[in-house]
Image (cartoon, rainbow, N blue to C red):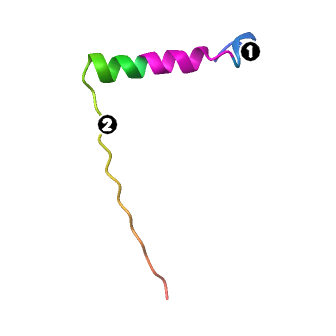
Amino acid sequence: MFNPLFYGKGYATEGCNAILEYGFEKLGMHIEALIYLTIQLFY
């Protein structure tokens, strides 16, 4: 939980961006996504 005094100041956004940048650039992480589309037709 964040203190309401700090809401809307961008601290959480800045922290998340720093964590993502570190993971992708320094640790060489990458995203793999698999998307499955299922269409079922009911008559």
Which of marks 1 and 2 precedes in the sequence? Answer: 1
Q: Is residue 29 left or right of residue 13?
A: left
Query: Quadrant location of residue 4?
Result: top right
What's the mark number on residue 31? 2
Residue drawn at the location 42% of the way across and 72% of the way down: 39
Check disc 2 and give the amino acid type. Ile
Q: Is residue 7 left or right of residue 20?
A: right
User: Where 33 falls versus 20 (above or below)?
Assistant: below
| Label 1 packing within 10 angstroms: few (<14), some (14-19), many (20+) | few
Q: Is residue 25 left or right of residue 1?
A: left
| Quarter of the rendering occupied by the N terminus | top right
Q: Which residues make up the magenta segment? A: 9-18
Query: Per the image, is 11 magenta?
Result: yes
What's the mark number on residue 4? 1
Image position, residue 20 (x, y; %) = 40, 22
- From this viewpoint, which residue is outermost toward the left? 28
Badge 2 marks a residue whose secondary structure is: loop
